[in-house]
Amino acid sequence: MPKKGSIILFQGDSITDCHRNKENPAHNEQLGMGYANLLAGELLANEPQNNYKIFNRGVSGHRVVDLYARWKRDCLNLKPDVLSLLIGINDIWHEFSNQNGVDAKRFNQFYRMLLDWTKEKNPDIKFILCEPFALPCGHITDEWFEVLDQRRAIVKQIAEDYQTVFVPFQTIFNEAMKKAPANYWAPDGVHPSIAGHKIMAEAWLKAFN
């Protein structure tokens, strides 16, 4: 469990961004409408004595290289004690849509560079590394899954190498699809419904604790 007064930062793409208000730093607007918001409510309500400061700096459309370009402003300057990172789907999506994705080798390289840079600034930081995921509906076709599996394996391996927490979101959604079809959890195959964000929050909180 993080110490009292810890700064918790959620980083990633549109799944984390989830329509957050980027102009207003108030917690109830800058946290967006997704799993980061649900988690902030849970943590702040159940552990008020810990006085967590929680930020969402996900940006829609971003790849791992886009995170690197804004990392000082949107991560290091906030001095997080806990960093939750979910990235990878746009590294694939941008390749299929306009041949501007990030290949597996560079995805691995830049992901590790982000963590190393962050740990250099705060050796005691705790990482929560989230598995990129997709569901077989909407924009997602069969050809996505081979390259997605590469990114999933990379993030899992990085979590093992850095001896930190790994949140298996793909596994969580695979189990959820036994209860309801894919488009119930993520209508376009990428962006979760409110139910999808809820099970993400539950999985993340289990890992956090």
Image (cartoon, grey):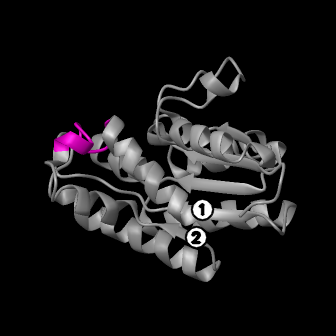
Identified at 24% across, 62% down, the residue is 174
The image quadrant of residue 69 is top right
Query: 133 or 109: which is nearer to us?
Result: 133
Residue beneath disc 2: 165
Q: Amino acid at mark 1?
A: Phe
Q: Quadrant of the N terminus?
A: bottom right
Residue beneath disc 1: 208
Q: Amino acid at mark 2?
A: Val
Q: Position of residue 131 (x, y in %)?
A: 44, 62
Q: Position of residue 56 (x, y in %)?
A: 63, 38
The number of numbered discs placed on residues in the rendered structure image is 2
Query: 27 or 68: which is nearer to us?
Result: 27
Marks 2 and 1 in Cβ contact (< 8 Å):
yes
Q: Is residue 188 magenta?
A: yes
The image quadrant of residue 160 is bottom right
Query: 127 or 198: which is nearer to us?
Result: 198
Query: 100 or 87: which is nearer to us?
Result: 87
Q: Nearer the viewer, mark 2 or mark 1?
A: 1
Q: Position of residue 135 (x, y in %)?
A: 23, 52
Q: Quadrant of the C terminus?
A: bottom right
Q: Which mark is residue 78?
A: none
- Does 117 sit above or below residue 134? below
Q: Is residue 192 visible to the viewer in this orientation of the structure? A: no
Left or right: residue 71 compared with residue 176: right
Left or right: residue 51 compared with residue 11: right
Q: Is residue 77 magenta?
A: no
- Does 138 sit above or below residue 203? above
Q: Position of residue 170 (x, y in %)?
A: 33, 62
The image quadrant of residue 88 is bottom left
Question: Bounds of the magenta span?
Answer: 183-193
Q: Earlier in the sequence, mark 2 or mark 1?
A: 2
